[in-house]
Image: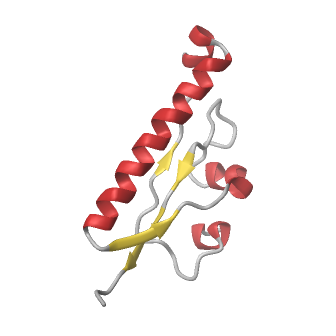
Amino acid sequence: MRLREVLAADAEPALVPALVPADQPPLGEYGRRGGRFGLLEAGAAAQSVCLRMAQQRLGGHLPGGAADAEVLALPGLGDQPVRLAAVIACGTTFTRR
């Protein structure tokens, strides 16, 4: 399956950063709170990527979590102790109005 199909995009994205925190060691050290720490950090990183894209007049979107398993399977991470915190489909160029 191609990423375009997994993300239900109009075209194959030019770049797709995926933020994939490992469950260990944060969960082992901090318990359930460790998982939240990883998600907070991933959210900050995703925001930085999106701000940089906007600065370069590029667009993209953050698809919802319905395809997490499929996205993790593409690079072979489907059976690993990781979670997909965010994925950003990048590559649409905006024009000035």
| Number of numbered tags placed on the structure image | 0
Of the 4 image quadrants, the one containing the C terminus is bottom left
Query: Which residue lies most toward the front here?
Result: 97
* Residue 52 appears in the rendering: yes
* Residue 24 appears in the rendering: no
Query: Which residue lies most toward the bottom here?
Result: 97
Query: Which residue lies most toward the top here?
Result: 29
In-image side of 93 versus 33 (left or right): left
Residues 50 and 25: in front is: 50
Q: Position of residue 46 (x, y in %)?
A: 44, 49
Residues 26 and 51: in front is: 51
Q: Give the quadrant of residue 56.
A: bottom left
The residue drawn where x is 58% and y is 67% is 3
Asked if 37 appears above or below 97 in the picture, the reply is: above
In-image side of 44 versus 37 (left or right): left
The residue drawn where x is 57% and y is 82% is 10
Asked if 33 appears above or below 72 in the picture, the reply is: above
Of the 4 image quadrants, the one containing the N terminus is bottom right
Asked if 11 appears above or below 29 in the picture, the reply is: below
Residues 15 and 34: in front is: 34
Q: Position of residue 18 (x, y in %)?
A: 50, 50
In-image side of 17 versus 84 (left or right): left
The residue drawn where x is 61% and y is 69% is 2
Q: Position of residue 93 (x, y in %)?
A: 35, 80
Q: Position of residue 11 (x, y in %)?
A: 53, 81
Residues 47 and 67: in front is: 47
Q: Give the quadrant of residue 77.
A: top right
